[in-house]
Image: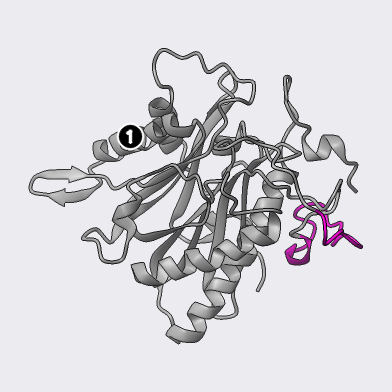
Amino acid sequence: MRPGPRNLITDVPGLRVGNAHDARLRSGCTVLAADRSFTAAVHVMGGAPGTRETDLLAPERLVQQVDALVLSGGSAFGLDACSGVADGLRAMGRGFAVGDQRVPIVPGAILFDLLNGGDKSWTRNPYHALGRAALDALTDSPALGSTGAGHGALTGNLKGGLGSASAILSSGHTVGALVAVNALGSAIVGDGPHFWAAPWEMGDEFGGLGPASAHDPGHEPPAMKRMGEATTIAIVATDGALTQAECLRLATTAQDGMARALVPSHTPLDGDLVFAASTGARPLTDPVTDAFALGHAAACCLARAIARAVFLAEPMPGDRQPAYRARFTTA
């Protein structure tokens, strides 16, 4: 297993990512889309999720594929970013066919960034426009760090951000992860600078410092955010041909990556969830062993993407928390 050429979720052929944010608002959104609809599922582990159209992603539902997935800041207001994406897709003639109408299927999830110092005194919800702008910005080389849905994100002790990572398996399948990190927990061990995800790092993608020499297994981490203020929302994707039920298993397995990279994770105060997407471009040679390998890769990619999100966050005036690279000197 090795990183893809970009080390981004867009190493999965056909996928593109668009980011949009408003610096005054200190918030934004991120869109994952493709040239055609793709199979998707979702798995929720956090106790305080905020979502749109995720009921459609259950394997027994009528609709089996989606047109885009959205990650957004803004708490419940941010769900309107999905509407902006849906309007844009409809204008392109995309969506689920119902008679002579097209209904774009755009599930999404939000994180809470309303208390991060940005100007939230809007009179008109800004997330619809941000969603449309993110759709218009689709690219195979998206920026990471303090951008998109991660623009105003915070963790328990450092700035959060937007992260991504990829892996190419020996089978030829590609797996990628995209994540907006706004966790209650911490991505670093103790006071840092070592990342919890270090055992899964490839090269020096988040500093190359390696694992911490020790940590206190009896440490009881405090809840450094209040109820509803935290959430890590992610997408894992593959070109492996998976059913919706198999995507659900991929999303479930990928949650292990979140637990490897954030301590604690999946708390009652977080809305942690993972979407899984399959473009279906590459058949599975062996449904059992290939699915096993894809799940392992998805968990590893998500752990790496979370660390990259925090590592690449940028300091900005008015920050309520330090950025990793402003706090620690790295080689």
Residue 149: image quadrant is top right
Q: Which residue is found at the position 31% from the left and 66% from the top?
A: 59
Q: Main secondary structure of the magenta part?
A: loop
Q: Which residue is mark 1?
A: 83
Q: Say whether residue 41 is left or right of residue 312.
A: left
Residue 113: where, in percent of width, then height?
57, 31
Q: Is residue 190 above or below residue 115?
A: below
| 153 or 6, nearer to the observer | 153
Using the image, determine if residue 88 lies above or below residue 305: above
**Residue at 31% of width from left, 53% of height from top?**
55
Q: Quadrant of residue 160?
A: top right
Q: Where's the N terminus, which quadrant?
A: bottom right
Amino acid at dot 1: Ser
Image location of residue 71, percent across then percent down: 48, 42
Q: Is residue 73 left or right of residue 126?
A: right
- Out of 8 and 185, give the one closest to the viewer: 185
State the scheme by which the image is colored: one colour
Residue 129 rendering spot, x and y as whole percentages: 40, 26
